[in-house]
Image (cartoon, rainbow, N blue to C red):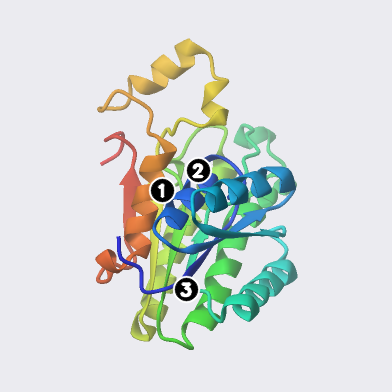
Amino acid sequence: MKFTGKNVLVTGSSRGIGAEIARTLAGFGLKVWVNYRSGEAEAKAVQAEIVATGGEAEVIGFDVSDESAFVDAVKSIVTADGELAYLVNNAGITNDKLAMRMKADDFMSVIDANLKSSFIGCREALKVMRKKRFGAVVNIASIVGETGNAGQTNYAASKGGTIAMTKSFAIEAASSGIRYNTITPGFIATEMTEVLKEEIKDAFTAKIPMARFGNPSEVAEATAFLLSDHSSYITGETLKVNGGMLM
């Protein structure tokens, strides 16, 4: 794939889908800033893997829900590289409980980590990218943001909000040559799904027309496409990566 920009920040990229996105983008020649909140060793392992395969990566630790920390991180990247060409807002958490048992703090903790952090990233990226009138942002949401899910009122709100927010940023930034898109993964095979009992996996798989979980690489390749020059006329879109579970 072709990329006009030179670097990318991938939040929450020390493991799972985020790490695969980081490795994939590095494979396409981008300098990747690998973000972590607490898993420094994991982030450095991702960095080392990228470097070992001929790519370029730096590790940058900060809590994405901390506004000042996120602002400072973007400034550090621009100071080091002269630009921030691409951003992937991938970091997020869950805190599942039935709605009637969920406290407001339980709700807001997920909103802050998932939606507020993505807003901060989108805003700071826009400030930097508009100076060069170029850039692209991909927000990783979830199928739950489109369908809802029992026990995940907070998570669904955060991801549904991300989808709507992305469209608004896309409208505001289009005249500056900056694109914003969303990816909504379905069931993806990660460390989190590996611990599920087989009968639970089978129940989930039965709901997927393609009859399997997705691979992190499939989300990563979709992310790369939406950042690349090949999607230069695509903005404000929500790309479903869910094996046909929701169409």
- First in sequence: mark 1 vs mark 2: 2
Q: Which residue shows up at 57% across the image and 29% down it?
A: 192
Label for residue 220? 1
Q: CA distance from mark 2 to mark 3?
A: 21 Å
Q: Is residue 188 found left or right of 94 in the rendered image?
A: left
Mark 2 touches mark 3? (CB < 8 Å): no
Picture coordinates of residue 30 (x, y %)? 46, 63
- First in sequence: mark 2 vs mark 3: 2
Q: Residues within 10 Å of mark 3 (few under 14, many from 20)?
A: many
The kind of residue tagged 3 is Ala
Residue position marked by numbered label 2 in the rendering: 17
The local secondary structure at tag 3 comes to loop
Pick the front one: 244 or 226: 226
Q: CA distance from mark 1 to mark 3?
A: 17 Å
Mark 1 touches mark 2? (CB < 8 Å): yes
Q: Which residue shows up at 63% across the image and 76% down it?
A: 80
Q: Which residue shows up at 50% across the image and 43% down it?
A: 17
